[in-house]
Image (cartoon, rainbow, N blue to C red):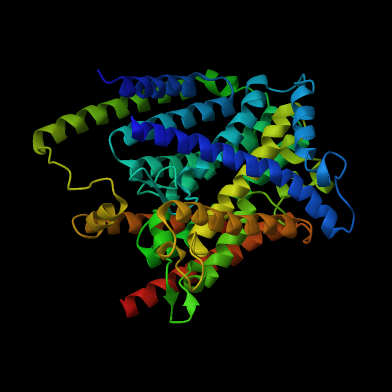
Amino acid sequence: MDLYFWVFASMSVLAGLFTVAAKDALPSAMGLLTVFIALASLYLHLHAPLIAIFQVAIYAGAILILVVFVIMLLMTPGERMGVIQANASYRGLGVLLGLCLIGLIAVGTKGVSDIVSMKAPPEGFGNPSIFGDLFFSNFLLHFEVVSVLLLVALIGGIYLCKKRL
Amino acid sequence: MDDWLIAIIKVVGIWVWVLLIAVVMTWVERRGAGLIQDRPGPNRAGPWGLFQPLADGIKLFTKEEIIPTKAQKFLYIIGPALFSLPAFSAYAVVPFGDKIILGGKEIILQVSDVNIGFLYILAIGSMAVYGVILGGWGSTNKYSILGGLRSTAQMVSYEVPLGLALLAVVFVYGTFSLRDISLAQQGTFLGFLPNWGIFKQPLGFILFIVAAYAEANRVPFDLPEAESEIVSGYHTEYGSMRLGLYLFGEYVNLVTISGTIVALYFGSWHLPYIDLGAYLGPISWGIVSFCIFFLKVAFFLWLFVWVRWTLPRFRYDQVMGLGWRGLIPLALFNIFITALFIQLTV
């Protein structure tokens, strides 16, 4: 088997386990960071450098930073998450959500394998310019739907922040 | 085998070279401060105090390593490493010259010419903030946490105008690769100007350099380590070589930023109005292009020092206000104008 894949796949799984099991908030966030970086390495291995770099720049570089920022604002160093983790209802809901997610993934992969036959990626896939071409030709609708979604999120954010509109 | 050898030589060579510049920069910074403040600066160790970095290095390496009792050990130790690792690896996609032909083999003077180009620098640069956060948080000191919080907010805010300014550059050149962008800057623009990025993106250059100063935590944006307010910010509790890694990583970042500025906006290894590559042999052109590139980088390194000892520090709300209310609208305006121009001319 592919050694590179095993190293980074096991690294992401172990880091993911650490993320949910860690007692402190910030080390847990660092576990998530390790997951992101391991996944980015796997994308690199699959010859998709652009996706790898987006994974690092957006998930690790922007979203996780916001999470860490909130942790730093709301907690003090050394404060444990034990109180939150001991809460039975949180635990139950967590199990429920996790099962739902696994179910979704299982249904999704099975459904996809039934409907879609895998196509070979276009020539030079992974190159940023090919990506742009695909976005503005075959996937224009998806692209526009996502941009409308982001616009809605933006308006919602402004609405929540303004005390008086 | 040859390719492997060349790659290894390039990686090790450029790494050592960048570290060397960073070492000399610590001396330039202090002598420059002396020059600007009308005092000698360090001048005892060696000629013009040139061995001062060496003395500092020995001092930092031999100092006792202290870990505060209340510190969270793991975070405290890993912080400086996480800060310096991205700094040391970011230069990989920045060119340091055109190309050199040795033994019939063409070698480009760049560690790796990848098609994602400076997106790599952006991604790696955004990793550096974790080192600051972990250092500030792991120290369990209120000044450190304040410094860490400030740097998080500042770096996240200024990544936006930085990315938007770079987006306009992509509009102009149609590529992310720093080598392709450098090659496209040969010749003249409008018949009389050198064909450099700054003449096509004047506003973009100003936005980029302001945002880059903020990303590098340099004056006037050094709020994370403002001495007069929060002692030393995120590295208050650090000593010995752990502190050294923080300070040193900052200078390595300066080299990368200067290299990026030169490659994007100042014509890389091209001289204005004259194409030396057409007159010189392949080996001598390789060396000359390296020197031209380095001289331009040296100017921007000096600019960092110059600005640091000339300008006062911003207040914190001014920094955030400038980022969100000043730079981002201007960057969006710049993108709009660039797109309009390209639409009308192409």
Q: Left of B68 or right of it: where is A152?
A: left
Task: Quadrant for the N terminus of chain A, please.
Answer: top left
At x 36%, y 74%, the residue is B342
Q: Position of residue B28 (x, y in %)?
A: 74, 49
Q: Is residue A69 visible?
A: no
In this rendering, is residue B88 above or below B168?
A: above
At x 72%, y 50%, the residue is B222
Q: Nearer the viewer, residue B108 or A121?
A: B108
Q: Nearer the viewer, residue B56 or B106?
A: B106
Q: Position of residue A160 (x, y in %)?
A: 52, 55
In this rendering, is residue B138 above or below B172?
A: above
Q: Is residue B342 visible?
A: yes
Which quadrant of the structure image shows residue A77? top right
At x 63%, y 30%, the residue is B79
Q: Position of residue B71 (x, y in %)?
A: 72, 23
In this rendering, is residue B53 above or below B331?
A: above
Task: Quadrant for the C terminus of chain A, please.
Answer: bottom right
Which quadrant of the structure image shows residue A147? bottom left
Q: Nearer the viewer, residue B143 or B272?
A: B272
Q: Left of A107 or right of it: where is A42?
A: right
- The single residue placed furthest to the right in the displayed view is B39
Q: Left of B181 or right of it: where is B71?
A: right
At x 82%, y 47%, the residue is B48
Q: Nearer the viewer, residue A146 or B221?
A: B221
Looking at the image, how many numbered discs can be counted on the residues?
0
Q: Position of residue B325 (x, y in %)?
A: 60, 65
In this rendering, is residue B64 above or below B199?
A: above
